[in-house]
Amino acid sequence: MPARATSSRFFLVAAALALTACGGGGGSKASSPPRVERVTGVVAVAGDGEVTVSWDPFPGALSYNLYWSKTPGVDAATGNLLQDVTSPQVLTATNGVTYYVVVTAVTAAGESAESAEAWFTPGASPVPPGTGHVGVVTTIAGSSMDYADGDAIHARFNTPTGIVGVGTSLYVCDTTNMLIRRLDLSTRQVTTLAGDPRTYAGHQDGIGTAASFNSPRGITSDGTYLYVADTANNLVRRIDLATAAVTTLAGSTTQAGAADGPGASATFRWPRGVATDGTTLYVADTMNNAIRALDLATGVVSTLAGDPASYAGYADGRGTAARFSAPYGLAMHGGELLVADSGNSAIRAVDPLTGEVTTVSTTTAAPYAIAVIGGYVYVANHASGGGDPVPGTGNTITEIDLATGEAWTLAGGNWYATLADGTGTAAAINYPEGMTGLDGKLYVSDTFSHVLRRIDLQPL
């Protein structure tokens, strides 16, 4: 495969180099001098049986090393080594398996520290960049506001919000029912994973229905656990996918705040979106106008970007110099954290290593949820007036080409209190608050319609 020129990225293209090969196709890991600055901007874009990894140029680099693993927390000591990566390469990989990668630079002074970890899951039906799409919207579960498990058509939700795909299942924050629900896409059956529909709000840890929540709204997964922003409890919870055991990781139900620290000594104020890179859980601390980071190994919470001591605002910058206004949805794009900055009608990017905040795109509505498939960012926008839908207007899904920054309306017609399947603007969506990508498709929590929607991406 010929190399593709680019002004700001190097691309790895290692034809026929399987990630599942023993030792990763590299040599022995020799000791190196003390680590220096690290590689930044690592992005892994999965395709069908392969991945393209890219990163920002490192000053003085003689070559690069890539370390990979099938478990999070990969580093130079534990990862499989791909040595002396200096030319464009594609890495082959097994569909459906999640991989974690870091990159180091080799200079005259030695090997740099590891980059932030990027992760990817190859799968069929990738979305190629540079084509653009129209969305075909189909209702796949639910029909009216209530609670019921069972087949997808007869199942009922009450204001579903956060949603994440794992394997062949979708996991949903059924917010007003105070539950975490599961939709098996292969059997089309809806079940309750955690929380008790017979009780009201609570904050009890336990297994399955022994646990309780209070308006959960954000959810993500590392493939082993679900992580939930238990919004009205001001807690971050973890659910073991194998056992349905619910554990509180951080936060306090007795006091809202913005305190950093371990476990229960940390406080949040209305946390919404969550995303993880496998080692850190990022939390959109909505009413604190900040992005918080929870170290999954130590349980320590820190403030990554934004200043909870300040009012809502808009400013790019590093750490507490940056400003947000009611950040909601989060998504990882390679080693970068994307933020739906709802009150500022903007999509922001945060470097997890430095806390540097930049603006990716602006909209004319309030972006609530965000997802990434291939070379595109998808934004779910809340209602914002009538008229013809344009990119970023309300009750629509916007598609943004990451390569060009161009945006257009993928689906939705900017209508209120309606539910209609269809293609593009012929479809109607009512307050979408959750969205995830899975196997090249988008899945949306159509919150005020109390249903789940699938959006198939057709090239324009």
Image (cartoon, grey):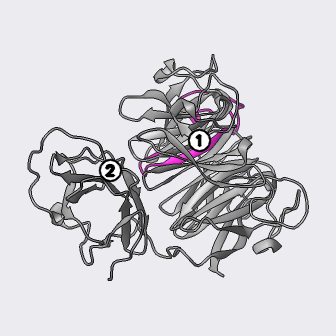
Left or right of 222, for residue 206? right
Is 271 drawn above or below residue 330 in the view shown?
A: above
According to the image, label 1 marks what residue?
A: 316
Q: Residue at x 15, y 61 (%)?
A: 23
The picture places residue 382, in percent across and down from the top left corner, at 78, 52
Residue 304 to residue 21: above or below: above
- Is residue 207 inside the magenta stretch? yes
Q: Amino acid at mark 2?
A: Val
Residues rendered magenta in the picture:
197-225
Q: Does 222 appear in magenta?
A: yes
Position above or below: 447 against 418: above
Tell me where residue 325 appears, x and y as whole percent. 69, 37
Spatial CA span between label 2 and label 1: 22 Å
Mark 2 vs mark 1: give the one in front: 1
Residue at the (20%, 67%) spot, across then down: 21
Q: Is residue 252 visible?
A: yes
